[in-house]
Each structure stands twice: as structure tokens, then as C-alpha cells.
Amino acid sequence: MGEMKATAIAHPNLALIKYWGKMDEVQLLPMNGSISVTLDSYFTKVTVEFSDAYDKDIATINGNEIPENTMTRLVKHLDRIRSLSGVKLKARGEAQINFPIGAGLASSSSGFAALTLAASTAAGMNLNKKELSILSRQGSGSSSRSVYGGFVEWLKGSSSEESYAAQIKDEKWWPELKDIAIVVSTSARKVDTRGGMKIAKDTSPYYSSWLENVSRDLESMRKAINDKNFTLLGKIAERNSLMMHGTAISSTPPLIYWVPETVLIMQDVLKMREDGIECYFTLDTGANIHILSMDRDVKRINERIEATGVAKSIGINGAGSGAEIIDKHLF
Ligand code: 2P0
């Protein structure tokens, strides 16, 4: 057998309609469908090699050792790929990430999409995009969407074979749309997304309203994307994010992912709208915040954010491409 090594690149995605709650915690089947945009300037590259030179799975991220709980998740995912492909060898993996990890910028979405593509290719499998999305989903739900570029919907489905992502429009569809990702805090959140969505589903009295609302939001978001209606996209994304946080803050125990700087930026976004700069915010399970805007306003928004003095870093992304194999290995 030849070399069992492959490298893939994938981009994180920003959820416009959030994945929030699991119907099946083993298969990672969601309670609701979700829609995202795959980002272009942030990326994760992963090289995987299966070889009898390794007596256990080993991996690094940006040259650093991986925390034990993350490593357990990675090994489990490699086990899935081994069992599907029949490969029994252990693997070495290396990931390179060009944006802050664990800061609510969806590093697991690009990480698992790149890992699934690299490892399945290294194991000699030739999965199509749908199969890749299903397999990647089992590692981390949101990564099912990063298999595709552009605007993507993860169809909830009622079984593993039915729960996968599909493209609504590709990355060339709406070049004017931009995401300004603002890091205000780099300290780790107390409750991660996986824990948070379970607590909200199990304890928030508003969780049923979340579910009732989300199907309407999905419909409006598809329309906003198809019509390139930025006002509709922004309003729905912002409200959907706040509804998700509404279930989080009304959970037992309460999950407050925001820090004062988060709220400061939120209020600045509302103020910018009053001042005639059209922009909207959306937040995942962390203190950091994304501002959706049109290209023509990015510079002005950036200046306003810089002037607040609370941004530790700012990343600007348009719509990016789906996961793909690249030639240049990381080791
Ligand atoms: C999303 N998030 O749609 C939502 C909104 C964060 C908030 O999906 O447990 O790491 O691995 O399936 O994919 C991040 O959660 O969770 C996420 P698991 P995942 O982007």
C-alpha cells in the first residue's frame, strides 16, 4: 500500500440561524435546522497520516499538544473513519489554524471538516460531499456545514442519513456581504457549546419558543439569501442569535456568555444603525461578536470599533469555499 497521508483545508462557518439543541447526543442530530455562511480568510489545514510507525493516535494544533478532552473527541472520530474504511493503523495529525481557537469563532467547524476530509482521504475513502457532511457532523455538528462553501443549510433530518448540509448559494453569490469578527475576550468560557445547548434545551422555559420561531427564521433567511436582501438577513440573524441567548440566560444554571465589552459592541451596532450605517450583530456561545455588514461600510465600522478600545483583534471575512484536499502537507 502507498502512502496513507492527506491534507485538507476548511473554513469555519458563521451561523446566521443557530444550531441549538440536540435530538440525539450520540449521532449529533440537531433539534432544528440551521443556516450559515462559510468564511473566507479564516482557515484550518489538517494533515493526517495512518502508519504502522505510530502505536497510538498523536496530534498537535499549531505545534502545541492537544488537551485531553479534545484528543478523546479526535480519537473517537478517527475510530469512526477506521471502522468505515477498514484501516486499522494509528494516525498522526497536525492542524494549522490562523484565527483564535475556542473564542467562539467556530474552530470546531473548520477543524472537524478538514479532519474528516483529510483522514477519510488518507484512509483511501472517496466520499462525496453529502457523505462527508454526515460523517463530519458526527464529530461536531456545525462542521457538517463547513464541507460546503457560500451559504449553507444543515437539514435537521430524523436519522443520521438524513441529517446533512446542502448549499443554498455558492461563495460567489454575494461578494458585498462581510462579517467583521471582533474578539473582546480570549479567556475560555465556563460552559462550552455542547454543555450549553444541553442545559438550555433541558431547563429553559423559553426553549419551546426557540423551536417554534426557528422554522420561520429559516424560511426568512433562505429568502434573504436568495433575494440578496441585507436588511432581512441582518435583522433575522441578529434576532435569532438573541433568541438563542434568551434561552441560555433563562437556563438553570443561567448561561451568560457575554462580558461588558460584548454589550458595549452590541449597543454600538444599534447606534451605528441610528447613524445610518446599516449593520447587525450575531454571537455564538462566547463573549466575542460578529458584525454583519456590506462591503461599502466595513471601513467606517472598523473605525468605530477601533475607537471603542475594547477589540483585542478584528477579522474581516467574506463568503469562502468548502473543504478541499490540498497538495502541500504540514509534515
Ligand atoms: C452554530 N454553535 O450553529 C451554533 C451556534 C455555537 C452557537 O454549532 O456539540 O461545536 O460539537 O455538535 O458544532 C458550535 O457547536 O457543537 C455551534 P457539537 P458545535 O454554529
Image: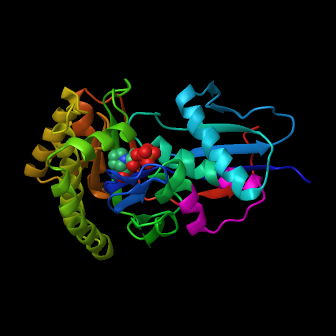
Instruction: Report if residue 185 lies within the magenta region.
Output: no
Task: Locate residue 302 relative to residue 144 in the image: left or right.
Answer: left
Asked which quadrant contains residue 135, the reply is bottom right
Q: Position of residue 21 (x, y in %)?
A: 32, 50
The colour style of the image is rainbow
In this rendering, is residue 28 above or below 233?
A: above
Viewer-side residue, 111 vs 317: 111
Residue 284 seen anywhere in this rendered image of the structure = no
Q: Position of residue 118 (x, y in %)?
A: 68, 51
**Picture quarter with the N terminus:** bottom right
In this rendering, is residue 296 above or below 151?
A: above
Q: Residue at x 57, y 44 (%)?
A: 44
**Picture quarter with the C terminus:** top right
The segment highlighted magenta reads: 117-135
Q: Residue at x 31, y 38 (%)?
A: 196
The residue most toward the left is 274
Asked which quadrant contains residue 103, the reply is top left
In this rendering, is residue 295 above or below 282?
A: below
Q: Name the chief secondary structure element in magenta.
A: helix
Q: Residue at x 19, y 32 (%)?
A: 254
Instruction: Report if residue 133 lies within the magenta region.
Output: yes
Residue 309 seen anywhere in this rendered image of the structure = yes
The residue most toward the right is 1
Q: Position of residue 57 (x, y in %)?
A: 72, 35
Q: Position of residue 150 (x, y in %)?
A: 45, 64
Q: Residue at x 76, y 52 (%)?
A: 122
